[in-house]
Image (cartoon, rainbow, N blue to C red):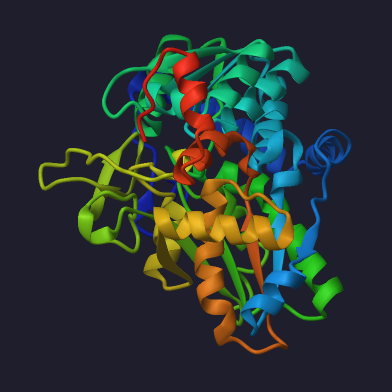
Amino acid sequence: MNKDGFFGKWGGAFIPEILHETFEQLKSSFKEAKEDPDFWQQYLDIMSTYSCRPTPLTFAENLTRHFGGAKIYIKREDLNHTGAHKANNVMGQGLLVKRMGKKRVIAETGAGQHGVATATMAAKFGLECTIYMGEVDMLRQRPNVFWMEKMGATVVPVKDGSKTLKDAINEAFRDWVTNVDSTHYVLGTACGPAPFPEMVSWFQSIIGTEAQQQILAQHGKPPARVYACVGGGSNAMGIFQGFLDNNAVELVGVEAGGKGIATGHHAARLCGVDASPGVAQGYKTMFLQNDDGQMLETHSVAAGLDYVGVSPILADLAEKKRVRFASATDDEVMQALDLTMRMEGIIPALESAHGFVQAFKEAPLLGPDDAIIINQSGRGDKDIFTIAHAFNDPSWKEFIIARGKEYDK
């Protein structure tokens, strides 16, 4: 990253003047924290005593036998506190909030995992907390909304636009502009204006650091490939950083293919045909947009992958061909999820299952001396009703009817 927050031609900080001083304070505090070994040790300590780190690297023996080819390992971020990788970032930002002396945090959330993690951090550190969440996502991720509220957060439904993640981000920025003195925006993914992409990636790098050490201990050498789903990009950046310097390890990001790239109902920015360079929400990256620069509606069975943009760091790595990108359709995701549950007793989040799809396609093409790692960014508890609906289980209908609402697939 250069001094202006760009990764190659992607990134930057396109912000209103009212936020300039706030961003200067954030950049200064983050720079000081990065240069302070005591801060990183404090972060490691709280992640080990409060958030169950290091998370295990699980050898998927049954899936390996089923597919043949490479040994399949799963990095278990689902066992991190709050059930996903999101805690890594929010606990780090929470320590920064304490360093800056602010008393209130706000956040956006799509799948709800970032919202739960932020509410958890706010409860732990005694901060006031407001979470913005698209109305559509609130319905399909109701269990997470419940936990956010029980931990004391105010969850605000966003009714504008597509009522999903990008709209929640817009509302969170509006709040921040109004409350800059007291509030920190805990952005949940490696997107947005600098220094957020670098900062979120730094805290998430704990995943890759652990995975790199664990695969050497268990397999004796680096993996042939590492797979991760890609929404905004925080979990992918987290695990990829453990292997970026080793060009022998291929890094594979898997985006939401939705109903198929050709249908237009997807969220594939780096492997699709509907994205183009643009500036929105404070940074430059590849966005799904029309010729007039208006953002397109996205679709994914996974609430956390239907974001219209992508991390500028991943856009740069894609351009440099250091990361290869693929997509997985909703149907493929459900098949991979079903197989993983039945063969390993592990329930990936719908987001994470996108990475499993591509890994399952490619594992048989490698040799038995090779290993691959799939980053399971979260667990599927939050997706229970979406999954039940996809599997035609009647329980989802009973749940929605009991709440007097219609379920929008």
When asked about the image quadrant of residue 300, the answer is top left
Identify the residue at image location x=72%, y=51%. 206
Along the horizontal axis of the image, is 396 left or right of 263?
Answer: right
Residue 407 x/y as whole percent: 39, 27
Residue 8 x/y as whole percent: 39, 60
Along the horizontal axis of the image, is 78 left or right of 244?
Answer: right
For the view shown, which residue lies furthest in the left direction? Answer: 292
Tally of marks: 0
Identify the residue at image location x=71%, y=58%. 75
Identify the residue at image location x=82%, y=50%. 54
Which residue is nearer to you in this view: 397 or 369?
397
Q: In this view, does 340 lie above or below 293?
A: below
Identify the residue at image location x=34%, y=57%. 9
Is the C terminus in the top left, top right, bottom left or bottom right quadrant?
top left
Which residue is nearer to you in this view: 181 or 207?
207
For the view shown, which residue lies furthest in the front direction? Answer: 394
Q: Can residue 194 be seen in this view?
A: no
Along the horizontal axis of the image, is 381 left or right of 198?
Answer: right
Which residue is nearer to you in this view: 71 or 64?
64
Q: Is residue 70 above or below residue 297?
A: below
When asked about the image quadrant of residue 373, the answer is bottom right
Residue 322 x/y as whole percent: 48, 72
Q: Is residue 83 visible?
A: yes
When asked about the image quadrant of residue 242, the answer is bottom right
Residue 117 x/y as whole percent: 65, 29
